[in-house]
Amino acid sequence: MRITSRTKKIAFFVTLGACLVGLAVALNVTWVVLNWREVVPLVLGIIFFGLIIAGLILYTVFLVREIHRNEQQDSFLNAVTHELKTPIASIRLYLETLESRQLNEPRRHEFYRIMLEDTDRLLGTVEQILKAGEARHGTNKKQWQEVDLSSIVLETIELTRLRHHLPPEALRLGSQPTETMLLRGNPAELRTAVFNLVENAVKYSGEKKDVVVDVLAPGIDTVLLRVRDHGIGIPPSELKSIFKRFYRVASSANGRVKGTGLGLFIVRSIARRHGGDAFAESEGLGRGSTFTLRLPRVYHV
């Protein structure tokens, strides 16, 4: 198994930090032994060496986190470059073909359709990057209004079916309350959060897609959006990390799914900005995943 450069760097700094801490402890013990009869130098020495050890530990943790963050940013840049370069190259190829060859009408329409899909892919990548930047800042609550979550979910399901050419049984609505599920917030942001969850479930479901979307009301002040798939799943150790910016699950199946690692980060940022949260559940690789978006509900008596 090949050891990555990031693993080597982390191992180096952890080892260096451990050696420095060990050296500081040895010096501290020596100081205590030499000055055990003198109270003031003994106490000051223990405090001083304690601060040195704490500083070394914090420094090592900081370096390891920075290395990990830089690695994630490099992966993000590589993913974005691929997401932008591939459709541009495809569009260029079809345009050159249309310019240099005489094609019949059905063939020309097919080329136009593919180029439009590539354009949508480009636009989607750019929008994800822009929304990730917006997700780190506050939102103007003066623009908030009451929004029907069930309506957004139905629109998203229909749009995703059309986009991925899915039959109704591959992506379907499960439980849905009979009453209106009203939220107060930014309609565009809430649509983005719902779309990212549904799109994520479809992308990671593999060839045989089976995604169920539920809208639940566990209480009069809370509404839940639950998206379940039977796809590649998530290792339990990574469930808390997948909502971080640039983070992507490090599995062999995940390598075949393109993305920027921003979708779930945007979902949680929007949820928390609206007074809610987002979390994930999975029993492990190959056993599917369940994503839940929890938001405060506007209830009118």
Image (spheres, rainbow, N blue to C red):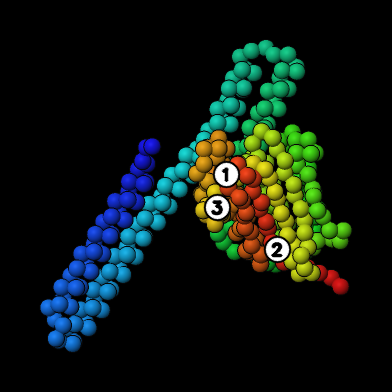
Q: How far from the left and from the top, in percent, is residue 286?
A: 60, 42
> How far is disc 1 from disc 3 in space, using C-alphas?
9 Å
Residue nearer the viewer, 195 or 143: 195
Relative to 39, residue 17 above or below: above
Q: Counting other residues with Cα less than 10 Å from the Cα at mark 3, is it few (<14), some (14-19), or many (20 or more)? A: some
Q: How far from the left and from the top, in percent, is residue 50?
A: 27, 74
- Give the image quarter of residue 2: top left
Camera sees residue 207 = yes
Relative to 193, residue 230 above or below: above
Relative to 230, residue 294 above or below: below
Q: Indicate which disc residue 236 carries.
A: 3
Secondary structure state at the residue bearing disc 1: loop
Relative to 207, residue 51 above or below: below
Q: Counting other residues with Cα less than 10 Å from the Cα at mark 1, is it few (<14), some (14-19), or many (20 or more)? A: some
- Residue located at (70% from left, 38% from top): 209
Secondary structure state at the residue bearing disc 2: strand
> How far is disc 2 from disc 1 in space, using C-alphas?
28 Å
